[in-house]
Amino acid sequence: MASKFNTLGRISALAGIALIFAVSTTGAMAASTPTNQWKFDEATAGAAAVDSVGSNSGTAFGNPAPQPSTEVAYTSPSNPGSMQFDGQNYYEVANTLSADFTICAWIKTLSTGGDWHWIGANIIEAEVGGYGLDYGFGIDNEGKLMFGNGGEMNGAGNDNNVKGMTVVADNTWHEVCVTRNNTTGEIILFVDGNQDASGFTGVGLLTANPVARIASGTDGAVPFVGLIDDLRLYTQILPGTEIASNFETDEVIYQSGVGLANTGNDSRALLALGGSLLLAGAGAIAFARVKRAS
Ligand SMILES: [Ca+2]
Ligand SMILES: [Ca+2]
């Protein structure tokens, strides 16, 4: 019997390794490292929002300050909390974005904003009054994603926006991302791992404001009321495949029993199956590929 168990163990381990390769080739890849990541796991209102990869912790503003919440987008044991904003409170951080970048966050809100980037219900922005090399990422007047910035386009400096197609202000958790290409001016918006819309804005280093605000704005922005979790800034353009892979890992493999947005991603079933078998057959190996904590 002992040899039989040993054989089964070997088969199980081999199956697990084979599945790791299978999962890896369907979208998972070496994860890009954010420049800044705020997991919002603080348990005390008013505490600094710790930047878990950089040195750009957020300073809390508002009375009361942003409130810690135990409601999170998924049930990974590494994610104990998110942050509740009331529309009057926010964090300030140094603005670390300028040329190419990606912003990703989990949000749950009913807030809708205005129809320009400086008056959106903004998740993060580094705005200056009037025209300037600034930006804002948040929700527009239709409850859809919006990213805009000031920059040079067609020989002139102007503000331009790119707006999403999907309503994200529906009081359901969504992972929202934007990529910005400072060579072409292309902006791509993502909702729950899928490309939602794309367009073009002006180019230039978006450093007019050295400070960025999280869940607020500086130039008439509409209050953001709701939850934000796992805000990540990357000083590179993440490929759509990696954004999709991050979403699949976060929401499909490690969460069950929660109604998810329909992603329509073909790799979902295989990833879910792979994840389940990995957990069953090679637990230690499987946990080695648990997502980055958020
Ligand atoms: Ca969190
Ligand atoms: Ca402006």
Image (cartoon, grey):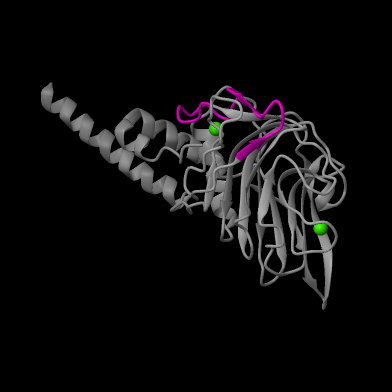
Q: Where is residue 286 shown, x and y percent of the image?
A: 36, 36
**Residue 288 placement, left or right of 71:** left
The answer to if 201 sits in the magenta stretch is no
Relative to 34, is 14 above or below? above
Q: Position of residue 57 (x, y in %)?
A: 54, 43
Q: Residue at x 22, y 31 (%)?
A: 9
Q: Which quadrant of the view contains residue 222?
A: top right
Q: Determine which quarter of the picture holds residue 20.
A: top left
**Residue 107 vertical position relative to residue 149 in the rendered view, above or below:** above
Task: State the quadrant of the N terminus.
Answer: top left
Q: Residue 105: percent from the left, percent from the top?
A: 62, 42
Residue situated in front as seen by the camera: 199 or 202: 202
Look at the image and give the residue range highlighted in magenta. Answer: 59-80
> Relative to the observer, which residue lies in front, 211 or 52?
211
Majority SS type along the magenta span: loop
The residue shown at (48%, 49%) is: 54
Q: Farthest left residue?
A: 2
Nearest the viewer among 88 and 235 is 88
Along the horizontal axis of the image, is 4 left or right of 100?
left
